[in-house]
């Protein structure tokens, strides 16, 4: 190998080391890692912390639902059409309509006709919605700072990159049809 070939060989080796590999459910290490990730996912969605953190973040007396906060996050940046809101929230238009109806009923958002086309319904955050959004966003930032302080800067960068890849992989499952599969050996039923 000549000296001019070495950089290419090093780059190829780095790409190969970084390339995703298939999960092998006959490999006990892959099984254990999949189970740990699965348990963590369950804890993130339903763990004991959720009730306490939701009460802290979204309020106890008149709480905002997480889905409402997602919509308010978008509306705090700019007004949206119903279609834009549905697309950004990754929900179907009828679900967006119901979500906006609830926001309007709770005085957190307002609907209005688009100035250039009265057939298009626009949604904007209300004054009350902005006030409540700001309060939740501040508490969310405090909680995130506390959580992320458990990691050093390099670990936070790794976590952010891995979560980005995880979300991208989840997005790649869009349209995946349910299939019947047998449970791989080594994976318990509960």
Image (cartoon, rainbow, N blue to C red):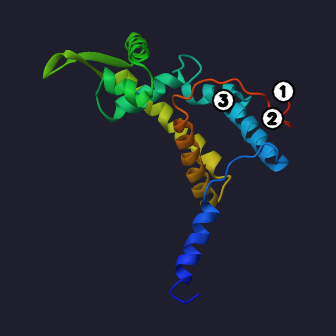
N-term-proximal mark, 3 vs 2: 3
Q: Earlier in the sequence, mark 1 or mark 2?
A: 2
- The answer to which of 170 and 108 lies nearer the viewer is 170
Give the mark toward the camera: 3 or 1: 1
Q: Position of residue 23 (x, y in %)?
A: 71, 46
x then y, percent, for residue 86: 39, 24
The residue tagged 2 is 184
Circle 3 is placed at which residue position? 45
Q: Is residue 125 visible?
A: no
Q: Which residue is mark 1?
A: 189
Picture residue at 67% right of the left edge, 34% below the top: 44
Q: Is residue 165 visible?
A: yes
Q: CA distance from mark 1 to mark 2?
A: 10 Å
Depicted 72 relative to depicted 30: above or below = above
Give the label on residue 24, or none.
none
Q: For the residue labelled by badge 2, is the local secondary structure a helix, a strand or a loop?
A: loop
Identify which residue, 48 or 91, lies in the foreground: 91
Quadrant holding the C terminus: top right
Relative to 16, is 106 above or below? above
Q: Report helix, strand or loop for mark 1.
A: loop
Instruction: Report the residue at 64% width, 31% height from top.
Output: 53
Residue 61: name its quadrant: top right
| Tag in front: 1 or 2 | 2
Report crowding for label 3: few under 14, some 14 to 19, many 20 or more residues within 10 A (C-alpha): few
């Amino acid at each position: 190998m000549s000296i001019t070939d070495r950089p290419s060989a090093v780059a190829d080796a780095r790409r190969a080391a970084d390339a995703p590999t298939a999960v092998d459910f006959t490999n006990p290490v892959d099984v254990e890692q999949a189970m740990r990730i699965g348990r963590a996912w369950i804890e993130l969605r339903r763990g004991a912390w959720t009730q306490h953190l939701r009460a802290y973040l979204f309020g106890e007396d008149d709480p905002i639902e997480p889905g409402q906060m997602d919509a308010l996050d978008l509306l705090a940046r700019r007004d949206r059409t119903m279609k834009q809101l549905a697309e950004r929230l990754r929900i179907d238009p009828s679900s967006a309509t119901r979500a906006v109806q609830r926001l309007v009923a709770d005085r957190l958002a307002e609907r209005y006709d688009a100035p250039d086309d009265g057939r298009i319904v626009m949604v904007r955050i209300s004054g009350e919605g902005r006030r409540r959004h700001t309060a939740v966003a501040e508490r969310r930032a405090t909680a995130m700072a506390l959580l992320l302080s458990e990691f050093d800067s390099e670990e936070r960068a790794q976590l952010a990159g891995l979560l980005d890849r995880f979300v991208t992989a989840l997005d790649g499952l869009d349209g995946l049809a349910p299939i019947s599969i047998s449970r791989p050996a080594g994976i318990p039923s509960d």
